[in-house]
Amino acid sequence: MIRTHEKFWSQHMSEEIKHHALDSDAQFEQQDMSPRGVYAFLIGLAIAGILVAVFLWGMYRVLDAYQKKHQPPQNPLVESAETDTRSLHPGEVRADIEKTFPQPRLETNERLEINDFRLKEEQTLNSYGFVDEKAGVLRVPVDRAMQLIAQRGLPTTPKVGTVPPAEAQSPEGKGKQ
């Protein structure tokens, strides 16, 4: 009957370790993994990655063809698109943006578009102009509007059931007659 420690350990192993410790020529472990094995693994990994990418590309093509084949018929009253809108580039969209591409459109450069929007808002807030020319409603800059409210006060509405004083009855109106 073989004992467990004798099965996995022998006196020769310990002597071999002692000899390697004394031998100055041995500079590394001889049972290390070889570079050949590492390169084989990396090549296998690259091949597997390429195979997965090719498989997914083919799968998307098959599913896209299936989806196009099983598309329900379009209502004859709806205008059909001449091209596939999924493959448009931003330059193509900008050329005939009002005619060809439907709403809502995605922003292509958010920073420039928000800066243009803020610039227009600033110009509106800090300039004079008409809001409604027919009704005679004007727009004044915010700073000037604040000065006018500070001078004149906020307009008030009369309480329900009271009659506002007429110009002739007010002390200011008496001097004008």
Image (spheres, rainbow, N blue to C red):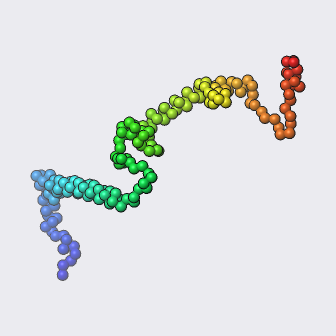
Q: Does any portion of residue 140 appear in the rendered image?
A: yes
Q: Is residue 57 left or right of residue 121?
A: left
* Residue nearer the viewer, 49 or 138: 138
- For residue 121, what is the image quadrant? top right
Q: Give the quadrant of the N terminus.
A: bottom left
Q: How many marks?
A: 0
Q: Residue at x 22, y 73 (%)?
A: 5
Q: Residue at x 75, y 31 (%)?
A: 155
The answer to whether residue 175 is above or below residue 27 is above
The answer to whether residue 133 is above or below residue 63 is above
Q: Position of residue 139 (x, y in %)?
A: 63, 27
Q: Position of residue 170 (x, y in %)?
A: 87, 25
Q: Position of residue 87 (x, y in %)?
A: 34, 46
Q: Position of residue 75 (x, y in %)?
A: 43, 55
Q: Does any portion of residue 38 appear in the rendered image?
A: no
Q: Give the quadrant of the C terminus.
A: top right
